[in-house]
Image (spheres, rainbow, N blue to C red):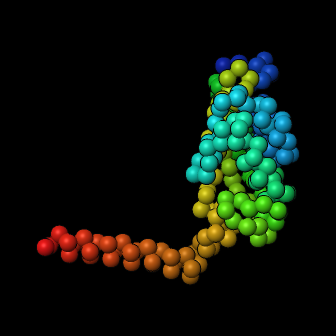
Amino acid sequence: MAETKTADKPESTTRKGPATIGRAYITALSNHDLDAAEALWKPGSVDHLVGMADIKVPGEFRPWFANLFAAMPDFSMEILSVTAQKERAAVHSIARGTFDGSAKFEGLSPNGAKVELAILDLITVSDGKIVDNYGFLNGAEMARQLGALPPQGSFAEKAAAGAVNARVAAAKLIERARSSR
């Protein structure tokens, strides 16, 4: 595990600096410890899972992550690196899980799919609490791994792209026909 710390003060003198808080947050989620994870947040803050959800803490936080853990009971996150500067920490991790639980996830029923995704959380900390997080992941890759999109480069993916291109071409033809009247 690599860790990079860049700040005005060394992390050890700030005790609850962004690198420490960011690491604690991802570890709590990996351990399915919603009490510990939620306790790191300032109430009224938002966890932005870019392209998926904006989760208000505390009201929406626990139900969203409890559902994720019910859908993927073996969900875990491995921290690869933490880089911090001033009030922000960037936590690079790998999320893994098997979609074989008892709950739907993002509208999909469990199907036994294995998921492994790189995630980057950009966490902002103020007074020892998380006040903002932007979690970035490749949503299309997640959908592929969950079976909601065809595999990259497959015939099905090429057919879907062809259908989109045909729709665009038809729309252009219709617009040209209307314009020439």
x, y (%) of residue 50? 59, 48
Residue at the left extreme of this rendering: 181
67 over 153 or under it: above or below: above
What residue lies at 44% left-to-right and 73% top-to-bottom? 164
- Residue 172 percent coordinates (x, y): 28, 72
Above or below residue 78? Residue 14 is: above
Give me the residue at 48% from left, 74% from top. Answer: 161
Q: Nearer the viewer, residue 73 or 116?
A: 73
Residue at the front extreme, as displayed: 59
**Image x and y of residue 42, in percent:** 71, 27
Residue in the image at 67% along x and 23% along y: 126
The number of discs equals 0
- Could you tell whether 1 is left or right of 158 in the image? right
Q: Position of residue 58 (x, y in %)?
A: 72, 35
Could you tell me which residue is drawn at 85 percent across and 57 percent down?
A: 74
Q: Is residue 16 left or right of residue 126?
A: right
| Quadrant location of the N terminus in the rendered image | top right
> In this rendering, does residue 63 appear at all?
yes
Please tell me in which quadrant of the rendered image residue 60 appears: top right
Whether residue 113 is visible to the viewer of this picture, yes or no, is no
**In-image side of 102 versus 166 (left or right):** right
Quadrant in which the C terminus appears = bottom left
Residue 125 in the image: above or below residue 52? above
